[in-house]
Image (spheres, rainbow, N blue to C red):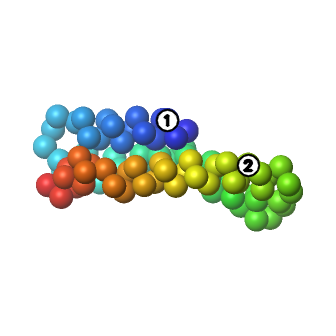
Amino acid sequence: AIARGKQEIEAIKANPEAPNFTNTFDALERAGELVNRIAEIFFNLNSAETNDEIQALAQEISPLLTDYSNDILLDGALFERIQA
């Protein structure tokens, strides 16, 4: 899901059309839907019915999700497209 989300972000950045609300903001809103849905389900389960295995997975998954989010938030090319 993270790889797919990254591909969706790359597609936004590589779009040859001039940035506009639809091809930038709407596309950015949809990008990563799968990773967001999976993360929400997983962390709800972790909160509601946690166990050692789920907690161990959370410790592995959390840094991956943080890196994914940081890559998007700190992407200079994406920021320039949004700014335009």
Mark found first going from the N terminus, 1 or 2? 1
Which amino acid type corresponds to the residue marked 2 in the rendered image? Leu
Say what secondary structure mark 2 lies in: helix
The residue lying toward the viewer, choosing from 63 and 27, is: 63
The image quadrant that residue 48 belongs to is bottom right
Q: Is residue 8 left or right of residue 83?
A: right
Residue count near mark 2 (Cα–Cα under 10 Å), binned few <14, some 14–19, many ≥20: few
The correct choice, above or below, for 47 with respect to 32 in the image is below
Q: Residue at x 25, y 51 (%)?
A: 76
Residue 58 visible here: yes
Residue occupied by mark 2: 57
Residue plotted at (24% across, 35% down): 14
Q: Secondary structure at mark 1?
A: helix
| Residue shown at the point (86%, 57%) measured from the top left | 51
Q: Does the image show residue 21?
A: no
Query: Residue 47's spot in the image, x, y percent?
Result: 76, 65
Q: CA distance from mark 1 to mark 2?
A: 18 Å
**In the rendered picture of this protein, how many numbered marks are placed on residues?**
2
Residue beneath label 1, please? 3
